[in-house]
Image: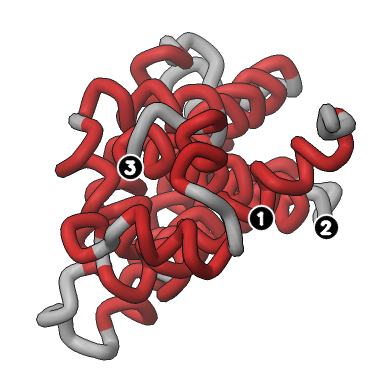
Amino acid sequence: MRRSRTETTETIRKLIEIARAHFTKHGYANVAMESIVHEANLTRGAIYHHFRGKKDLFRIVLEDVQREVAERVEQEASTSDDPWQQLYLGCRTFIMSAVEERNRRIMLIDGPAILGWEVWREMDNKHSMRLLREQLDTMQNQGSFQGVPLHAMTHFISGALNETALWLANESVHPSALDETMKVLTVFLEGIKQRTIQSPDVV
């Protein structure tokens, strides 16, 4: 009997959720497809019908994590009507979401190592980096960052955020590092804001 499209979608979603939990807890290298199959109560044939293998399943999980983080960034930024506050909230939420336990290993440790930086950056460009670019574009249209190339600025800020998240993902980082990071983020954005106000044509 053929499965309905809804049942297929539910099965794929279930597999992604189970795989995400396993990759989060054990890390990519220590996860066996058999354990995912067993928990999902499926056959190996069923899981390989939807995914080519463990690496392909992990890629889908990482994409899911990237999408979820971007959604949280967009949701948090939308709580303010002030464009500068929106930028701050978006940057802050990206960092805090990326380093959460359920995201940290998949997004910041295993993601780049297993799939490579090119794939990782492509996903980032589709999700969080896209939102950053749109926010900066909106702000420039409203009068901020006049004369500043947005493509370069987007990569500059995105690179800083990604590097900071990678640094914070290191378990040896001091517990106060996250608070210190948020202070630096505030100083950085306030500095740009003040320079924009004082010299609107040059940041």
Does the rendering let one see residue 51? yes
Quadrant showing the C terminus: top left
The secondary element bearing badge 1 is classed as helix
Which comes sooner in the sequence, label 3 or label 2? Answer: 3
Residue 41 on image: x %, y %: 60, 63
Q: Is residue 44 left or right of residue 26?
A: right
Separation of residues labelled 1 and 3 (CA atoms): 15 Å
- The residue closer to the viewer here, 148 or 67, is 67
Please determine whether, in this image, residue 66 is positioned above or below residue 150.
Answer: below
Q: Residue at x 52, y 50 (%)?
A: 43
Residue 38 on image: x %, y %: 48, 66
Q: Nearer the viewer, mark 3 or mark 2?
A: 3
Looking at the rendered structure, the kind of residue marked 1 is: Lys
Q: Residue at x 35, y 48 (%)?
A: 161
Separation of residues labelled 3 and 2 (CA atoms): 38 Å
Which comes sooner in the sequence, label 1 or label 3? Answer: 1
Quadrant showing the N terminus: top right
Residue underneath mark 1 = 14
Residue underneath mark 2 = 79
Is the C-beta separation of discs 2 and 1 under 8 Å? no
Q: Nearer the viewer, mark 2 or mark 1?
A: 1
Looking at the rendered structure, the kind of residue marked 2 is: Thr
- The residue closer to the viewer here, 35 or 63, is 35
The furthest residue to the front: 1
